[in-house]
């Protein structure tokens, strides 16, 4: 089972911008109810399309530079 890759300000460029395939980035925050509701769907996408796209998750509260 594939999970979204956790990205930060420090690794965003390598994990997303320089990725070797298309990337879906889930921008979320810990206190965001809708973000928590969509999280299982994002994980399903990461698993179902693991060979076609890379799925990444970025916490916008902790990574405000990006």
Image: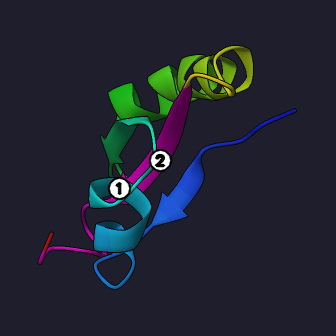
Nearer mark to the viewer, of 1 and 2: 1
In the rendered image, the residue lying farthest to the right is: 1
Q: Can you say whether 13 is above or below 52 in the image? A: below
User: Do residues under tags 1 and 2 come within 8 Å of each other at their CB atoms?
Assistant: yes
Q: Can you say whether 22 is above or below 37 in the image? A: below
Quadrant of residue 44 within the rendered picture: top right
Res 30 seen here: no
Quadrant holding the N terminus: top right
Q: Is mark 2 on a helix, strand or loop?
A: strand
Q: Counting other residues with Cα less than 10 Å from the Cα at mark 2, is it few (<14), some (14-19), or many (20 or more)?
A: many
Q: Can you say whether 64 is above or below 18 in the image? A: below
**Magenta stretch bounds:** 53-65
Q: Please name the residue that numbered disc 1 is placed on.
A: 16
Q: Residue at x 53, y 61 (%)?
A: 6
Q: Residue at x 34, y 85 (%)?
A: 10
The mark that comes first in sequence, 1 or 2, is: 1
Q: What element carries label 1?
A: helix
Residue 15 point in image, percent of width and height: 43, 63
Number of marks in picture: 2
Q: Counting other residues with Cα less than 10 Å from the Cα at mark 1, is it few (<14), some (14-19), or many (20 or more)?
A: some
Q: Can you say whether 61 is above or below 37 in the image? A: below
Q: Please name the residue that numbered disc 2 is placed on.
A: 56
Quadrant holding the C terminus: bottom left
In the rendered image, the residue lying farthest to the front is: 20
In the rendered image, the residue lying farthest to the left is: 65
Residue nearer the viewer, 47 or 64: 47
Position of residue 47 in the picture relative to residue 55 (left or right): right
Residue 23 point in image, percent of width and height: 39, 37
Position of residue 52 in the picture relative to residue 25 (left or right): right
Position of residue 66 in the picture relative to residue 59 (left or right): left
């Amino acid at each position: 089972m594939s999970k979204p890759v956790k990205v930060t300000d420090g690794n965003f460029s390598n994990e997303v911008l320089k990725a070797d395939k298309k990337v879906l980035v889930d921008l979320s925050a810990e206190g965001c109810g809708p973000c928590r509701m969509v999280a299982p769907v994002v994980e399903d996408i990461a698993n179902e399309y693991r060979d076609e796209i890379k799925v990444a998750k970025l916490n916008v509260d902790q990574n405000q530079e990006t």
